[in-house]
């Protein structure tokens, strides 16, 4: 499907649960409420006409002004050759969301990465641990207000003059 | 090295220091550990490859720390990796030398501002030779290894081994391992 | 390697082995925790992050052109593609036109880089499975490519050649001739490689029917590039979502056919890469024959301020789709950059497919999936 046709189709499929961005530059995306996050992803992945079976990229962005973290999933379909970007926003303090790992196994590691770098935890995730940083690391580096510790296990984190 | 060749009744012999003899042997079999962390490791690999051929100078790579004399810090060192590198260093037998290859291992280089990168190998290891470059070419790496050879040449190794002096440059970091 | 024996009761006795992060066959700093009964694995759990350099956070404090050198380090075996992916993202966000000559040069440099990267991969696969000679031969060829690329842009590993809006340096006719000369030489080497190693009995036995990845699994776990094609999914970004000059070029996309065993086994992943070498040569030849004269960089100001918005752009690198997601808030610096790399997903599938494999097979799996540390960790 072309991207316009896909947008129309998804609008029909999901009804009033969709919110489209329509930006001036760059990609268009769909925002959904975090309660519907898992169900909508499930629908889009299994629906015959969408068949978005490939999770291309899954990440988060921190927006401290809005006190929210935005999760962005880029999905794609090899058979139909179309892609869709789905987003949701969750609060910064609580920072929990449902896992997508049952829908796309690729999400297992992407969610571990988001947990590690942004501090978002996922309900029912099979293996939620830090992935890139060491287990005893303090803080979540990709949050905008992240401050580094002065030493890590005795190694200074700035170069002495 | 200073040595005298003397004529004796049953043939000629050499008079010299034992240190010099040991150093001659050590210098010409400088084995480095096959260990790279990032981009510089690609050049490290090419150094052992057909064109640069470090074998010519008696430098061959070994896969285990127990058999190697030189640890080459080839690439970016992250905090997660630092304790592992220190462990590898502890496993090497004395005498041992450390080369910091590339700006990352020297000072953190491009990644000095990053939260995950150690700002220089000398913060947790005693570094003997620093090689600049991003990445240094294989010729520079060979030059660095040759500097280590020159250092070996001058070392009073026997004396050092007996007195068991600690390397004064070695940063003592508790809790790293 | 350290070992731990867990006493669990007779049938469940488990030997936990640590492999890496310093291990000659893990290609850089990868680490695995193997749960075995001695020889057969229950599972192999990959541990990554030993080369996590925080490239994504650094982007938030550098300007757009200033970030391009960092993209070299996303994958130092194929720096051209990461340069290109990032440049492409900014070009599409702020509507920058790339001159045609620059697009041709990107394709030539990119395919040369692909050959160089595959040389290392193929060499490493054979070396890990016991044959050292092909590795040294291929390293020799790689040196020639390094020389060519150095003549083009002055760097052997971290190229920084593709810039936002075009490329950094022009190539003269003499350089193009030398590339052609190299291709004449290299095409003979590909044939030699076929005779020397590809169908070697030992190699085939070590790889055929080992660690089969089905097409569904491959798509579900997000495998890309040669790994995906080896599982029988016919997909190549250069052909199916064309960018740059690729729509004008004619080339085939090799896919796994289960030549010696099952579709999606280690041998397929190996052979797909060998076949790609030839296609890359074909692409470069066409580019050299058709390259037009003209500018090499578009009209780009020194200060790039893309409009507010976000974009995901991807190119087909040597390890498949190499994508970058850029969020711009209208200032000189990106608000968020995220890299999507083939090795990350390839690494995540290892735990799933490792059950029941021998420990020695794991080496074949890592080598043929072609995981390298900078891409998984970034
Ligand atoms: S010095 Fe440069 S080439 Fe070497 S590891 Fe650091 S970034 Fe990579």
Image (cartoon, helix red, strand yellow):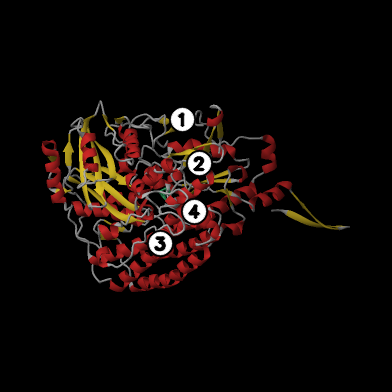
From the viewer's perspective, is the residue at label 2 or at label 4 nearer? 4
- The answer for how far apart the CA atoms under marks 1 and 4 are is 45 Å
The crowding category of the residue bearing disc 2, from other C-alpha atoms within 10 Å (few below 14, some 14 to 19, many at least 20), is many
User: C99 or C372: nearer the eye?
Assistant: C372
- Residue B138 on image: x %, y %: 49, 57
- The answer for how far apart the CA atoms under marks 3 and 1 are is 43 Å
From the viewer's perspective, is the residue at label 3 or at label 1 nearer? 3
- The answer for how far apart the CA atoms under marks 2 and 4 are is 22 Å
Ligand 1 lies under 8 Å from the Cβ of mark 1: no
Identify the disc placed on residue A154.
Answer: 1
Q: Are marks 1 and 2 on the same chain?
A: no
Above or below residue A67? Residue A46 is below
User: B124 or C10: nearer the eye?
Assistant: C10
Q: In which quadrant will I find the N terminus of chain C?
A: top right
Residue A35, quarter of the rendered image:
top left
Q: Which element is circle 3 on?
A: helix
Q: Tell me if label 1 and label 4 are in contact, CB under 8 Å.
A: no
Identify the disc placed on residue C207.
Answer: 4
- Residue C90 on image: x %, y %: 23, 52
Q: What residue is disc 3 on?
A: C115
């Amino acid at each position: 499907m072309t991207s316009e046709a896909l947008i129309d189709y998804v609008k029909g499929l999901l009804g009033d649960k969709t919110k489209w961005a329509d930006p001036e530059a760059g990609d268009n995306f769909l925002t959904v409420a975090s309660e519907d996050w898992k169900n909508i992803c499930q629908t889009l992945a299994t629906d015959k006409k969408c068949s978005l079976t490939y999770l291309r990229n899954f990440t988060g962005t921190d927006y401290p002004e809005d006190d929210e973290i935005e999760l962005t999933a880029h999905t794609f379909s090899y058979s139909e050759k179309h892609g869709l970007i789905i987003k949701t926003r969750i609060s910064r303090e609580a920072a929990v969301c449902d896992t997508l790992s049952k829908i796309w196994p690729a999400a297992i590691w992407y969610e571990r990465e988001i947990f590690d770098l942004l501090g978002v935890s996922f309900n029912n995730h099979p293996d939620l641990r830090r992935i890139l940083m060491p287990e005893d690391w303090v803080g979540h580096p990709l949050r905008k207000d992240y401050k580094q510790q002065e030493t890590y296990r005795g190694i200074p984190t700035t170069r002495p003059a | 090295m200073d040595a005298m060749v003397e004529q004796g009744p049953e043939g000629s012999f050499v008079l010299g220091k034992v240190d010099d003899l040991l150093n001659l042997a050590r210098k010409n079999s400088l084995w480095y550990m096959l260990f790279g962390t990032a981009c510089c490791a690609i050049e490290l690999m090419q150094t052992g490859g057909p064109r640069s051929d470090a074998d010519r100078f008696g430098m061959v790579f070994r896969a285990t720390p127990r058999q190697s004399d030189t640890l080459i810090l080839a690439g970016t060192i992250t905090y997660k990796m630092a304790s592992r590198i220190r462990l590898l260093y502890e496993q090497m037998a004395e005498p041992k030398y450390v080369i910091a290859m590339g700006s990352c291992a020297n000072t953190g280089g491009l990644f000095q501002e990053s939260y995950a990168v150690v700002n220089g190998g000398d913060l947790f290891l005693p570094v003997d030779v620093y090689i600049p470059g991003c990445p240094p070419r294989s010729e520079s790496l060979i030059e660095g290894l040759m500097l280590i050879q020159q250092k070996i040449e001058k070392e009073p190794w026997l004396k050092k081994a007996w007195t068991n002096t600690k390397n004064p440059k070695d940063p003592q970091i508790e809790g790293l391992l | 390697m350290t070992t731990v024996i867990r006493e669990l009761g007779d049938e469940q006795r488990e030997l936990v082995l640590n492999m890496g992060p310093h291990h000659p066959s893990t290609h850089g700093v990868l680490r695995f925790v193997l749960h075995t009964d001695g020889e057969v694995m229950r599972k192999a759990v990959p541990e990554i992050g030993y080369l996590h350099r925080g490239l994504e956070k650094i982007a938030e404090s550098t300007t757009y052109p200033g970030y391009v050198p960092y993209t070299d380090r996303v994958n130092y075996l194929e720096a051209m593609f990461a340069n290109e992916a990032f440049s492409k993202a900014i070009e599409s966000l702020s509507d920058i036109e790339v001159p045609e000559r620059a697009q041709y040069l990107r394709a030539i440099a990119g395919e040369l880089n692909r050959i160089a990267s595959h040389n290392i991969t193929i060499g490493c696969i054979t070396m890990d499975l016991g044959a050292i000679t092909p590795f040294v031969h291929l390293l020799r060829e790689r040196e020639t490519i390094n020389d060519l690329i150095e003549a083009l842009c002055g760097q052997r590993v971290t190229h920084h050649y593709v810039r936002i809006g075009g490329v950094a340096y022009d190539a003269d006719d003499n350089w193009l001739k030398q590339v052609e000369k190299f291709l004449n030489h290299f095409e003979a080497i590909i044939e030699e490689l076929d005779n020397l190693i590809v169908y070697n009995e030992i190699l085939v036995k070590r790889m055929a029917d080992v660690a089969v990845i089905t097409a569904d699994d491959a798509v579900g776990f997000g495998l890309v590039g040669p790994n995906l094609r080896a599982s029988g999914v016919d997909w190549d970004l250069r052909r199916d979502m064309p960018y740059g000059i690729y729509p004008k070029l004619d080339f085939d996309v090799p896919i796994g056919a289960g030549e010696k065993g099952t579709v999606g086994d280690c041998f397929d992943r190996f052979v797909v890469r060998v076949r790609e070498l030839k296609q890359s040569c074909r692409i470069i030849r066409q580019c050299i024959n058709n390259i037009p004269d003209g500018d090499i960089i578009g009209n780009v100001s020194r200060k790039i301020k893309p409009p507010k918005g976000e974009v995901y752009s991807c190119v087909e690198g040597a390890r498949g789709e190499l994508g970058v997601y850029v969020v711009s808030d209208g200032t000189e610096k990106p608000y968020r950059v995220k890299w999507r790399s083939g090795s990350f997903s390839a690494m995540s599938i290892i735990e799933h497919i490792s059950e029941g494999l021998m420990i020695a097979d794991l080496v074949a799996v890592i080598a043929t999936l072609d995981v390298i540390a900078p891409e998984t960790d970034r």
